[in-house]
Image (cartoon, rainbow, N blue to C red):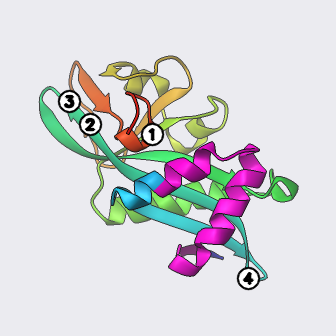
């Protein structure tokens, strides 16, 4: 079952991200995004009332040709290591993208596995025109609204919570 996170889920989400990523970095990013009021959507997957997956989408500053795009970053996504490759991540991404589209978000940006995210429509070519701290096949974008990223060039500014541009 996929649900939006509740405050009671926060400790289990932190434990899951520690287990999936082997450290504190993602847990700290999630905490900073929450404190900054930047969470657009946070979903959990449950099996027998236990959280086995989590995905977070956060508000992202994207412009194309000087026009603001209502965009989010997909990061992080975690699945219980014992349950990976069982479809939990796929359901989290698909459900999340559907909910974001219903909430009038226009685009999603991800830095992720180039063999995984294209199945959902993410494209490195679409992201290539966006000036960002990342480039290459792992930096991808997806339009939730047709032509949301149309234009010759644009830019992505990650919130300080990601600590990409320096300390918060």
Give the numbered dot on residue 64.
Answer: 3
Give the numbered dot on residue 62.
Answer: 2
Main structural element of the magenta stretch: helix, strand or loop? helix
The reply to whether callout 3 and callout 2 are in contact (CB within 8 Å) is yes
Q: Quadrant of residue 112?
A: top right
Q: What separation in Å lies between label 2 and label 4 (alpha carbons)? A: 36 Å
Residue 9 belongs to magenta span: yes
The reply to whether callout 1 and callout 4 are in contact (CB within 8 Å) is no
Q: Quadrant of the N terminus?
A: bottom right
Residue position marked by numbered label 1 in the rendering = 162
Q: Of tags 1 and 4, which is closer to the observer?
A: 1
Specify few, some or many for label 2: CA neighbours under 10 Å numbering under 14, 14-19, or 20 or more: many
Q: Is residue 3 left or right of residue 58?
A: right
Q: Position of residue 93 (x, y in %)?
A: 56, 55
The first of marks 1 and 4 along the sequence is 4
Give the numbered dot on residue 49.
Answer: 4
- The one nearer the camera, 134 or 2, is 134
Part of the protein shown in magenta: 3-31
Q: What residue is at 80 percent from the left and 50 percent from the top?
A: 85
Q: Is residue 123 left or right of residue 151?
A: right
Q: What residue is at 42 percent from the left and 65 percent from the top?
A: 99
The first of marks 2 and 4 along the sequence is 4
């Amino acid at each position: 079952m996929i649900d939006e996170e509740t405050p009671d889920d926060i400790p289990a989400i932190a434990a899951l991200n520690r287990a999936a990523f082997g450290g504190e970095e993602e847990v700290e990013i999630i905490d900073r995004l929450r404190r900054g009021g930047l969470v657009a959507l946070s979903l959990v997957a449950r099996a027998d009332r236990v959280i086995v997956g989590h995905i977070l989408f956060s508000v992202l500053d994207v412009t194309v040709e000087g026009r603001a795009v209502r965009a989010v970053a997909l990061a992080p996504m975690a699945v219980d290591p014992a349950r990976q490759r069982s479809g939990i991540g796929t359901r989290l991404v698909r459900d999340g993208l559907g909910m974001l589209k219903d909430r009038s978000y226009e685009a999603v940006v991800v830095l992720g596995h180039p063999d995984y995210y294209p199945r959902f429509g993410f494209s490195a070519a679409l992201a290539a025109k966006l000036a960002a701290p990342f480039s290459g096949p792992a930096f991808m974008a997806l339009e939730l609204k047709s032509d949301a990223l149309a234009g010759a060039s644009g830019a992505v500014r990650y919130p300080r919570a990601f600590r990409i541009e320096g300390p918060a």
